[in-house]
Amino acid sequence: MKSVVIIGAGPAGIRAAQTLVAHGVRPILLDEAARGGGQIYRRQPVNFKRSAVKLYGFEARKANALHQTIDELREQLDYRPDTLVWNAEDGALDTLHEGRAARLEFSRVIVATGATDRVLPVPGWTLPGVYSLGAAQIALKFQGCAIGERVVFAGSGPLLYLVAYQYAKAGAKVVAVLDSSPFSAQARALPGLLSQPATLAKGIYYRSWLTAHGIPVHQGATLKHINGEQRVQSLNWSNSSGKHTLDCDAVAFAHGLRSETQLADLLGCAFAWNPLNRAWLPQRDSAGRSSVAEVYLAGDGAGITGADAAEIAGERAALALLEDNDYPIAPQRGVQLEQALGRIDTFRHGLERAFVFPENWATDTADDVMICRCEEVRAGDIREVVREGHWEINRVKAHCRVGMGRCQGRMCGAAAAEIIACESQRAVSDIGRLRAQAPIKPLPFGLEIEP
Amino acid sequence: MIEVDAVIIGGGIVGASAALFLSQAGRRVALLERDFCGSHSSGVNYGGVRRQGRPLSQLPLSQRAHEIWGRLPQLIGIDGEYQRSGHLKLARSLNDLRALQDYAASSQGFGLDLQVLERSELRARFPWVGEVAVGASFCPDDGHANPRLVSPAFARAARHHGAQVHEQCAVGAVEHDGQRFRVSTQSGLELRAPWVLNCAGAWAGKLAGQFGEPVPMHAGHPAMLVTEPLPWVMNASTGVEGGGIYARQVARGNCVLGGGQGFALDDARARPGQHAVIEILRQAVELYPFLEGAQAIRTWSGTEGYLPDRQPVIGHSGTQPGLLHAFGFAGAGFQIGPAVGQALAEIICSGASTTSLDAFSITRFHSISVA
Ligand SMILES: Cc1cc2nc3c(=O)[nH]c(=O)nc-3n(C[C@H](O)[C@H](O)[C@H](O)COP(=O)(O)OP(=O)(O)OC[C@H]3O[C@@H](n4cnc5c(N)ncnc54)[C@H](O)[C@@H]3O)c2cc1C
Ligand SMILES: Cc1cc2nc3c(=O)[nH]c(=O)nc-3n(C[C@H](O)[C@H](O)[C@H](O)COP(=O)(O)OP(=O)(O)OC[C@H]3O[C@@H](n4cnc5c(N)ncnc54)[C@H](O)[C@@H]3O)c2cc1C
């Protein structure tokens, strides 16, 4: 029998599973990670024993609730951790678990694949000691270690202050926080942010805490250059008052998050340009139905809205799935959830104004800056292809290999798009969309196949 | 209204090289490409530039292409990562080895210089080949190139020589008014020319059918896969007698592998499919043991035209003077493409191709009813 499948055991996927179970469905929950929780509520390995408050701070209660949910559901669903979905076609998902490939047919699927950092490279970003903000947090949350002893946090987005705060709390020396968004942007964004006063309060708390503990926080600050021989030794940054240097042994940086949309793409979902996310996203209705009848979308994988929204969207998508299969559901629940999502969306618009995208990044990026680490493609290589007359991103990829390597453009795609758009003098929405190809993550030769 | 000597439909390596040779000869040409030049089969193929293994009837044309490939930089301005690494065709059984010996004997005189290698010689010269191979046939001057770079460069070179190249410009109607063709495109261009070259790849059957000579062509989708960069070991491009997994290694270290068939996503796009990908991952290590544990990072496929006899159609239409066809290359048109373009240019410039095209006439399908 074909199953209802959920991909991703983060807040969205777990709440979707819980909702399905509550209505008598036994879904299969696939997750690449070893333990459920997703990115924000990532769980430490089994034998690690730090408290939830230490790990998740203000979110400890939510983290506990979510972990408890998945633990309690264990018997009522078919939970398969350590399982990568590397391809989708023809009503089936292709998975890899402990070196074995298998095929899983589905009747319906909820895609809740989450997000990764959006990285806008700067000179020196490939030096050992440079991490994305998310990766810095994973090191702390998952393994209980810091990326360095004297760390600078740079870029923008809510994770910037959060991770800096978490590092400082954990006892690491935070040298400075360099926020590329100007203070004026954050003031302008305030009305939208007030729609989620509690979340806003947390954001303000992190920042005040940092300042109160003597950690310099600079706004309108641009990370210019990361320096070092074998690893990070210092960095240069600038603001309206001039150029500055800081000594440090690690840097964590990113400019917000980007959705993991490749599976939705392979599943045939229609995409549309989303100006708020500055990205192509799979289209969905307010309940999470994609353009493909069997496919539902929830959480940050379909557009960045954060953990609370992911939980709500997971439940909403599961209800839509149930509804479409003639299960009786409480109709007002769906309405409530959608209203809640609407409020978060207003907040999200506010966030985007508070943490503005650095529009000058592409113009300011020198030709020798490495954009695609996997294939070692520099900004100048991309520009050269554009100057030959190419502007469509897949075409540019074909010519200079940007996005063709191990990460398949998951890390460099956003930056490459900015460079192409800038050089071809087109809007970033007018250069096409990087097409996904299987495998979503590398697959080993010599794998075994499940009979 | 654009007046030219020839309208070429399809900006793959065949159409683009016809455009290049015609404009080098001073003809006015318009190359019309639905998407981007070299973005279909010609730009996504495996990159094998080999003569070995082709039907004998193709060898004169293939040999001519070999000469053109030899002066690629002069012709298109880049080397396209073309290298004459040699092509090693592996035999997994003594029967297969015998077939390779027979081919070597019958293809003598075409200039392939094949060397048949027994097991011990194969081991000594190509130690990275797996134990399953009992022997091989080696063609020292065959090789491989980067199709993503080579095919678009043919169109760019044609433009440098004066050809009009129109991309994102799908041909709609083609009519003949008794004297000339009138070609209109979906983007609104109107062209007139005494010659039309049907180089539309897997989509060429439509125009042939419209001029009263339908062909039994179907689309195929070879599955492709590439690894992360690996230490350099493969000093030859490979294939397998009787079919199997072919592989080559590029200078960066990535191995490109092909084998099996994918599926069509729609009329113009294809994917390699889970089945073919898994088969490559499982079986390749037998032939190429050094791949054990390596990672595949990307897969893809393309849309290629196949006729039942796996031979292309090249040359005059049997129904409409001035119409030339060149399609149906059955997964092997990258290597001969430039020679096909040159032969078509000769037909227009001097009345006939210097290499015989008789074996490839479309009239071989005239008596067959096409479903
Ligand atoms: C590193 C990182 C740290 C973050 N930290 C915070 C934070 O501290 N606070 C905050 O508010 N927000 C944080 N976020 C934002 C975060 O995206 C959301 O808050 C929230 O986790 C989104 O929930 P989700 O269920 O949509 O996705 P996620 O929580 O990201 O869960 C998605 C799950 O899907 C799995 N998955 C993805 N692709 C596949 C596949 N192909 N096959 C199998 N499984 C797959 C992943 O392993 C993951 O477990 C972080 C994001 C990142 C990337
Ligand atoms: C995956 C794969 C691997 C292969 N490996 C090899 C190999 O290793 N060695 C080898 O020699 N060969 C190989 N081949 C075969 C080779 O790629 C093709 O035979 C060759 O590229 C054919 O060239 P073409 O110009 O005829 O076709 P194409 O490159 O397909 O070009 C035809 C063009 O016509 C255009 N077109 C179609 N309809 C219209 C219209 N109405 N108006 C305007 N334009 C139109 C299309 O958009 C297309 O760009 C492989 C093919 C594939 C798919």
Image: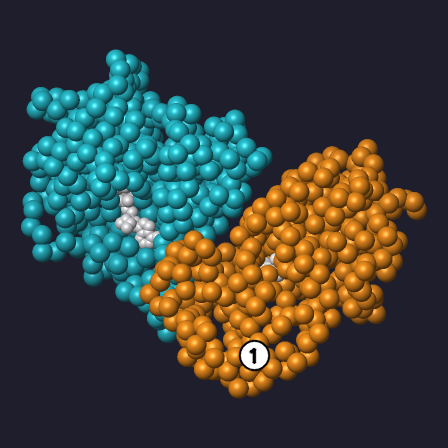
> In the picture, which chain is cyan?
A
Please state if A384 lies on the left or on the right of B180 as rendered: left
Q: Residue at x 80, y 65 (%)?
A: B356
> Which shade is chain B?
orange
Residue found at the far bottom of this picture = B94
Quadrant position of ligand 1? top left
Q: Position of residue A266 (x, y in %)?
A: 45, 52
Image quadrant in which the C terminus of chain A is located: bottom left
Find residue A59 and report its horizontal and vertical position in percent. 15, 37
Q: Which residue is denoted by mark 1 in the rendering?
A: B116
Front one among A402 and A411: A402
Q: Amino acid at mark 1?
A: Val
**Chain of the residue under label 1:** B
Q: As drawn, is A16 to the left or to the right of B200? A: left
Picture residue at 40% right of the left edge, 47% below the top = A375
Please tell me which residue lies in front, A26 or B59.
B59
Question: Observer-nearest residue: B125 or B254?
Answer: B125
Residue at screen point 7% across, 45% down: A51
Residue that appears at 63% across and 56% down: B70
Q: Is residue A419 above or below residue B69?
A: above
